[in-house]
Image (cartoon, coloured by chain):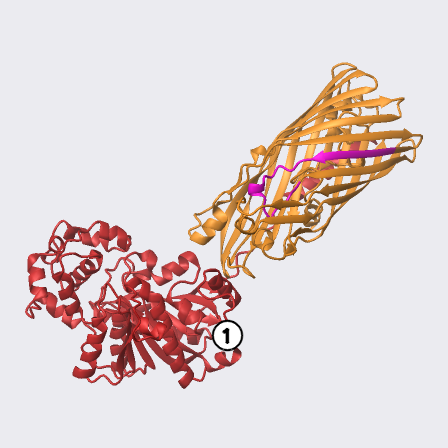
Chain colours: A orange, B red
Amino acid sequence: MKKIVLLSSAAISVLTAAAYKLPEQSVNSMALSAAYVAHTTQADTAYFNPANMAFMGEKQYLDGAVTLINLPSIEYYNIAKTKEENIIIPSLHYVSAPMGDFRWGVSMVVPGGLSKRWDEQPGKLFAQEFTLENVELNPVFSYKINDQFAIGGGLRVVYSSGVVKSDGRDGTPYPIARDMKGDTFEFGYNLALTYRPTEDINVGVTYRSNIDLEEEGKANLYLGSIGTQYDASVTVPLPAALNIAVSKTWDKTFTLEFGYERTFWSTYKQLDFQYSQPVTNPILKQAFDNPIPKHWKDTNTYKIGATMVMDKITVMMGFAIDETPIPDETLSFELPDSDAKVFSMGFRYQQTENLSWGAAFLYDAKEARSIAKGVSDNPVINANGASFSGGGAYLTTLGLSYEF
Amino acid sequence: MKIKFAYLFIAVSAFVLMGCGGADSLDQPDKEEVTGGEVVVDFDAQTMRNVLVSKEAIPADYNKPVYGYKAYKIPYETTDEEGNRIEVSGLMVVPTGVPEAMKQIGFSLVSDSHGTIFANAEAPTVIAETTNSPDGAPVILTALSGFVTLQADYIGFGDSLGHYHPYLLKSSSAATTVDFINAARAFAANNGIPLNGQLFVTGYSEGGHVAMAALQTLENEGEPVAFAAPMAGPYMLDRMGQGVLASNALPVPSFIADVAYAFAVRYGVNVDTLVKEPYASALPGLFDGSKARPEIDAQLTHVTTDLFTADAINRLTSLDNTYWFTQTLQLNSTAYWGPQTPTRLVQCMGDDVIPFAMSTGTASVMRDNFGAADIGVIPVEVAITGDVNTSIRLGHADCATPAYGVVSKIFADVRKATIGY
């Protein structure tokens, strides 16, 4: 039962980064729209730029946050819409005291995920539920080369589980259904570099490796009411991401950070379900066994964040422009993603010398997306075109930071 | 204190990740338990309607009932030509989502015998098991007309794959069909499927011949049949063989080659007395259930005199009554008796495989020579147009679907008049 609670809390959907990647993992990162790589200040430094741990104070740092995510429905024309989702996601970060020029830290975060649930046709035929849940444990280290340079890196341990359900048995001429659950542990790495040419300028570069999430489990395939169970697997990538950021601080009170993120979604070329034995039913084979082309594109995200420190209160604002990796040809109901603009704000209050708390709010404004008839690999969208509207996300984060 | 915080963090993280291990198990698909068979297709009524509309089998505004389609594979025993008991299989298709009153009265049975197949993959239970989808005549008879449809796989297919198929051999064709009717009735009784005792008999092409053979057995056993409507069957095998071998070319050589092979095996005659080499030696491999008709035809010749021996051609075309092949073709014909069941021979006038005259000739022989009680011929083109002068002509393959539509309506009318729905 505990496992179910934890995994449910990890479920997220189309969030601030296009597709199913979630960069914000703390109060500060949420308030700054993830423009939080060059100039990081809390224990979440372990996650956003571990090289920066080298320049933190002599204490240990702990940071925890809880994010409530509200995902409004996405509408397909006026025919069908996804369920509205409300999800809670935790994050936890720790940075140790320095050990000479070395330092270590660890983060537990939810780096990405997806949950789309359509109760109505035609969405239900393709994505009655399409959920990907990820939890990452990310132990990291930093090494201070000198007062200007530091490097860092770490190991990514990702637990991922997925649910794929589709059902065309009510209201479509395709009486087929699939019910699949799978999970996996996978590993990756991350690297970081910080250069501080002056005391008030930080340049940060981070890289997170691609992790192929090979979800292994069981799949029931149905035609009408007749079902067969298979051992099954499917691989989706948690893509590599390169962040380059620069920050400038004025009078130790106002900091502006510009960030660029390149997310390497092009590794996602197809969604190919594998089964333990051949799917001999020709209808099920065509629907559920043949690889589904994806051909996603690498994306660019541009971010800007501003931080103002005022006595006991720190105020933060952020803005980002985010591209979708999904081309018109392969957009489908499991993830009707679109380009987005991200607006965020938040604050942190220094309650005591060691304890601060804060809150942040982020609004992810997705653009409506239309697809003309005849261009999609999805048969329904190809025949009817598509107009997806609504969607986006509202994220509210509350967090505590403690240093000792 | 500081060390404890670090340990606490790691412990919490490890707990979370350990707790993640293993996806929630996925239950096996629900499988309906039945006695003496298994469910192989189950489409509810709405799904059937959606599928039929999408395939343009019915219009979107179709205002008659469409029933669900639930098919069971039923294993049973029958007797082959040599008198051996063997295990065979058949498909029973039951309408679902029917009105309660219909259930109370019970379903009428239609014994439908399928046309010629060569590949095991084409057998009714194999199709159903492979695709889990409705297929063929039961769509018309069950989903659109509310009958329970029975289709035996025939010996040589389904569960009896490996046995030679006794193609057009009367005794085992009848036994396979009649035994399946009995097995299906027992299955229905064991599984709460309500039957009203009414039985109709039909079948297309080879199935027309099989249906007629089964009708004769049923009558001999005193089993009442409400109505019979064999379709496009080669009832007079001797005449059929004579006509085929008299032609210079064989459009579909697999048909007559399979007749020669099955009869030679059945009557212990070397097949090379009928079929020339190298074809004679190839026949066991061609008719083992692994190949479909196009593949078989490609390995045979279409030239009659290249495929059949001169002796076979000469003696059969002259209907030499001393010739074993002529004798056994006559013996296995299903035209030479007089059904007492109301019977209509349904066929397209444009049939390009079995001449339409086969039906009219059979009806005449049955009525005039053997005292058939109520027999007639229904030209499908006339039935579907209502025009006795129609110029439409449908070939053997194209005729099957409309022919089943005609038969389905006849049976439904009889059911309405006798059963009440």
Structural crowding at the residue carrying mark 1, measured as other residues with C-alpha within 10 Å and reported as few (<14), some (14–19) or many (≥20): some
Answer above or below: position of A108 versus B82.
Answer: above
At which x and y percent is residue A183? 59, 43
Q: Chain of mark 1?
A: B
Q: Is residue B417 left or right of residue A265?
A: left
**Residue ID at (19%, 62%):** B259
Reading the image, the residue beneath label 1 is B98
> Which quarter of the rendered picture does the C terminus of chain A lie within?
top right
**Residue ID at (21%, 57%):** B251
What amino acid is at disc 1? Val
**Residue ID at (82%, 34%):** A317
- Confirm whether the magenta stretch covers residue A324: yes
Picture quadrant where residue B142 is located: bottom left
Answer above or below: position of B366 versus B34.
Answer: below
Residue B183 visible within the image: no
Q: Is residue B283 left or right of residue A185?
A: left
At which x and y percent is residue B159? 33, 61
Q: Which residues are magenta?
A: A315-338
**Residue ID at (29%, 60%):** B117
At which x and y percent is residue A88? 75, 46
Q: Is residue A235 left or right of residue B324?
A: right
